[in-house]
Image: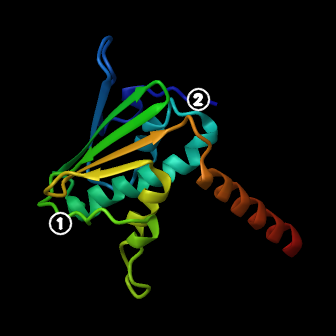
């Protein structure tokens, strides 16, 4: 079910939908971890079967921008530009922080896993598992994420399998 949102539903979010003839919409919001309304808007046009996976990935990227980029400073904004061309979806997430040294492009997705003792860093691996394209600008303040919905997603199957296993465990425990 698609839920339509009005800007007045979320007064802390500045939203500019794609004007006719333009490909990109834009939204900006104060650095916060309350991301549910932002994610609802960004995923409104995504097919429902893809929403759980993309919600997880976008949530991770937005948390990183608000928390690590902007230090949860409410005076700093997180900006998201988004576009849909055919079945190719793009999000460009930028923050107002001082940036970081983006990781080098590695050979495999698991190369982004942090040391097991690390409390942070698993999000990079997650982003590479969910999105087909993950690119940072040179100063680490802008992240480009791309996803093609033309091909079946391996992670959707993994999420469905995981959910099925959890439901079975709950049923057995009950």
What residue does disc 2 label? 2
Tag 2 or tag 1, which sits nearer the N-term?
2
Compared across the picture, whether 69 is left or right of 2 comes to: left
Q: In this orientation, which residue lies closer to the viewer: 163 or 134?
A: 134
What residue does disc 1 label? 101
Percent of width and height locating residue 116: 44, 85
Reply above or below: 161 against 113: above
Compared across the picture, whether 95 is left or right of 151 comes to: left
Q: Hey, which residue is sitting farthest front in the picture?
A: 107
Percent of width and height locating residue 39: 44, 43
Q: Please tell me whether mark 1 or mark 2 is closer to you in this view.
A: 1
Q: Residue at x 46, y 70 (%)?
A: 110
Quadrant where the C terminus is found in the figure: bottom right
Percent of width and height locating residue 12: 30, 39
- Neighbor class of circle 2 (other Cα within 10 Å; few <14, some 14-19, many 20+) is few
Compared across the picture, whether 113 is left or right of 164 comes to: left
Quadrant where the N terminus is found in the figure: top right
- Neighbor class of circle 1 (other Cα within 10 Å; few <14, some 14-19, many 20+) is few
The number of numbered badges drawn on the structure is 2
Judged from the image, the secondary structure of the residue bearing numbered disc 2 is loop
Q: Hey, which residue is sitting farthest bottom in the picture?
A: 117
The answer to whether residue 98 of the structure is visible from this angle is: yes
Judged from the image, the secondary structure of the residue bearing numbered disc 1 is loop
Reply above or below: 169 against 94: below
Examine the image and state in which quarter residue 21 appears.
top left
């Amino acid at each position: 079910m698609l839920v339509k949102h009005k800007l007045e539903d979320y007064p802390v979010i500045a939203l500019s939908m794609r004007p006719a003839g333009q490909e990109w919409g834009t939204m900006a919001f104060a650095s916060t971890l309350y991301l549910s309304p932002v994610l609802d808007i960004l995923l409104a046009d995504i097919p429902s079967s893809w929403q759980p996976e993309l919600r997880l990935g976008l949530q991770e990227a937005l948390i990183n921008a608000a928390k690590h980029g902007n230090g949860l400073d409410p005076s700093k904004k997180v900006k998201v530009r988004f576009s849909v061309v055919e079945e190719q979806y793009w999000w460009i997430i930028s923050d107002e922080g001082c940036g970081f040294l983006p990781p080098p492009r590695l050979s495999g997705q698991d190369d982004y896993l942090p040391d097991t003792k690390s409390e942070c860093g698993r999000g990079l691996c997650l982003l590479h598992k969910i999105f087909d394209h993950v690119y940072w600008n040179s100063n680490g303040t802008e992240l480009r994420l791309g996803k093609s919905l033309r091909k079946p997603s391996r992670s959707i199957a993994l999420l469905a399998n995981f959910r099925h296993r959890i439901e079975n465990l709950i049923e057995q425990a009950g």
